[in-house]
Amino acid sequence: MSALLDIRDLRLGFKGLRGITEVLHGIDLAIAAGERVALVGESGSGKSVTARIILGLLQEARAARVSGAVEFDGRDISTMPARQRAKLRGTEMSMIFQDPTSSLNPTFTIGRQFAEVMRRRQPEMSREACDRRASEMLAEVSIPDPARVLSAYPFQLSGGMNQRVMIAMALVNHPKLLLADEPGTALDVSVQALTLRLMHDLVERHGTAVLFISHNLGVVREFADRVYVIYRGRIVEEGPTRALFDNPGHAYTRALMSAVPRITGAGLPEVPEVSDDFLAPMVRHTGGAA
C-alpha cells in the first residue's frame, strides 16, 4: 500500500549564536491512507516540531533549517511554494492542538470560525450553508444544541466543549490527514477519555489517516494501529502497536513503559538509567497492524 504521508531523512536545525543546533536527526515515518499512527516520546523529544514541519509551518521560519523529503499524497511539501502549502492546511490536512481554548480565536463566534475553515475549500459557501454543515458536524461530536454553540464565543464554553468543537472543525472539510497533538491533555481525565473516543469514532467513519502525538501510552495502545517511538530527535523503534507493547525492543521504549504508574501498592516504578542503549540503532517490528 502506498503511503499518504512519507517522511524520509527529515532533519531540523535552529540557527543560534553558536551555529546550527540540530533537533531532528534523520526522521523516517510513513502513514497509509486511513491508518492511525502514533508518535510517542517525552516532552522535548521532537514530536510537535515534526507535526509543524508536516503542516509546512517551519519551512519559512528564518531561524529554522529543514532538510529531507516530506511527501504528502505524492507531493513534496518541502519544495512546494508557501502559498500552495497554506492551501493544504484546513483542507487536505488539519491539526488538533493540546489546548482547545487557546487554539480558538476568542474574538470570533464558533460559527464564524467554522465558516472561515469551510471557505478555505469552498470560498463561495453562504453563511447559511456553513451553519448547516457546522451544525451537522457538531451533532457528530455529540453536542446537543449546535445553534447555541455556533453563536457562542470560545470563552463561553467549557474546555471539553471547545475540544469537541476543535475536532469537528478539523474534520469538517474531510481532510485526508489529521494531526492530533496531545488532544485532551488540558482536560479532566473523564472528559479526555470521552473526547478521544469521539475522535476515534469520527476518523474511522470518515476514513481519515491520523498522526497521533502523545506521551500517554495507555491511550496510544487503544487508539493506534502502529507506533513510532522518538527519543532526542531520532526514531528508535517502530512497529504494530500490539507487537511493540508486548515486546519492546529498545531500552528507551522499555523505560517509557516502566514509567507508566501502576496501582499496585508497591510504590513508584523503577525507571532504567540512561545508557548508550538509548542511542542504539532503530528497532523495527514486523507483522500486520494491531
Image (cartoon, helix red, strand yellow):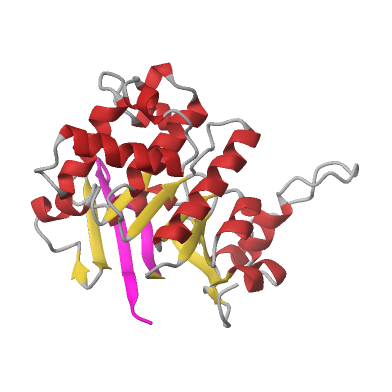
Say left or right for 235 vs 275. Answer: left
Q: Position of residue 215 (x, y in %)?
A: 57, 49
In percent of the image, x 48 and y 63: which residue is there? 37
Q: Position of residue 207 (x, y in %)?
A: 40, 63
Check residue 89 for magenta coloring. Answer: no
**Image point (59%, 63%), residue name:** 278
- Residues in magenta? 1-29
Instruction: Left or right? Give the position of 247 relative to 52.
Output: right
Q: Position of residue 249 (x, y in %)?
A: 65, 72
| Quadrant hosting residue 73 | bottom left
Seen from the viewer's position, the closer of residues 97 and 133 is 133
Quadrant housing the C terminus: bottom right
Q: Is residue 3 magenta?
A: yes
Relative depth, front residue between 123 and 272: 123
Answer whether residue 97 is visible to the viewer in this image: no
Residue 81 horizontal side relative to residue 9, left or right: left
The secondary structure that most of the magenta stretch takes on is strand
